[in-house]
Image (cartoon, rainbow, N blue to C red):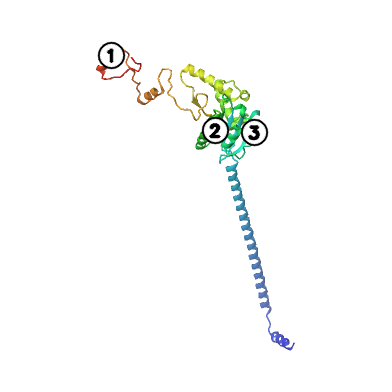
Amino acid sequence: MKQENRIRDAFDCIGASEELKSSTKEFLRDARQREAGHSIGRRRNRHAFRLAAGIACAMATLFLCIGSYALLWMPVAYVSIDVNPSLELELNRLDRVISGRAYNEDGERILEGVSVKGMRYEAAIESILGSEGMRPYLTQDGALTFTVATDSLPKEERLLADISHSTGCVEHGGTSVRADMSLVEEAHENGLSLGKYLAYKVLLRYEPDLTVQDCHEMGMSQIHGRIEEHEHGANHGSGHGAGHEDDYGTESGAGYETENDVGTGSETEDGMTDEDNRFIEQSGELPMESPAPQPDGQEQGHHEGNGHGQKSGHGH
């Protein structure tokens, strides 16, 4: 106790002026304010960082979702399968089926017994053609038609080639046809599959009074049969094929250009072949014809005079 009293007595003589006390209080107050400001700044910085990180994560998630949707769920190609049933497959970038849709009652009955969503298109086509509901329609004169539309030319060529060489297409005498992508929406607005709508557009050129509703009631064999009748009449009257290409798809002979179509040297009205016409375009001259048959003496003299030993193509 005595020791404590001595220590207190020793410090009792030490004093601070009022000015020193005041400046010390101000210093301590300012220090506390600065510390509080720094603390608030750090809290604000942490909050801003967390907000920026959250926004970045949200944007990354959004881009990932958009990319996944574009890859998995956005249709980039359409394949319609038409006989009397009309079916259509929507494909994503991975060539897998996003959805299968029916465009008439026969097609609806087939899709009720077959699930193709998520399949690769080759497997989906084989599954549809191998189903019990499809078999009655796959007759020799059924006119099985596959129609492909996509904005990618390499993809279109690959789809057409794969389908035309598939087991189902070969076994049932099917044909694969290309169509313009712009027709897809137009076909759906009219309640038809892409393939049937393309066939309707071809037939419409010969039968201007034909309606979409008329085509709803027709199978592909009927539509193709009427197209062939019109084109056969045009061929008979003009002496050459009526194949042509328009804004909707590429058609030839029976209304369409397929993977198996090849060019031929048909004759025109004047009896000249395509090869002759190409010769004229390139040289500007008519191809040389064989001389008319003449008496022996004259023919020999003619050959000797002009220096040509050309034989007649008619066997004289």
Residue 84 visible to the viewer: no
Marks 2, 3: nearer the viewer: 2
Mark 3: few, some, or many residues within 10 Å (few <14, many ≥20)?
A: some
Residue assigned mark 1: 299
Residue 74: x and y in percent read 59, 40
Quarter of the rendering containing residue 188: top right
Disc with the residue nearer the chain's start (3 vs 1): 3
Q: Is residue 307 left or right of residue 198?
A: left
Closest to the observer: 30 or 276? Answer: 276
Element type at mark 2 = helix
Tell me the number on the disc at residue 167.
2
Mark 1: few, some, or many residues within 10 Å (few <14, many ≥20)?
A: some
**CB atoms at circles 2 and 1 under 8 Å apart?**
no
Q: Residue at x 51, y 36 (%)?
A: 158
Quarter of the rendering containing residue 221: top right
Real-space CA distance between mark 2 and mark 1, rounded to the nearest whole angstrom: 61 Å
Residue assigned mark 3: 111
Residue 302 visible to the viewer: yes
Residue 139: x and y in percent read 58, 25
Whether 17 is drawn above or below 106: the answer is below
Marks 2, 1: nearer the viewer: 2
Q: Amino acid at mark 2?
A: Thr
Real-space CA distance between mark 2 and mark 3, rounded to the nearest whole angstrom: 20 Å
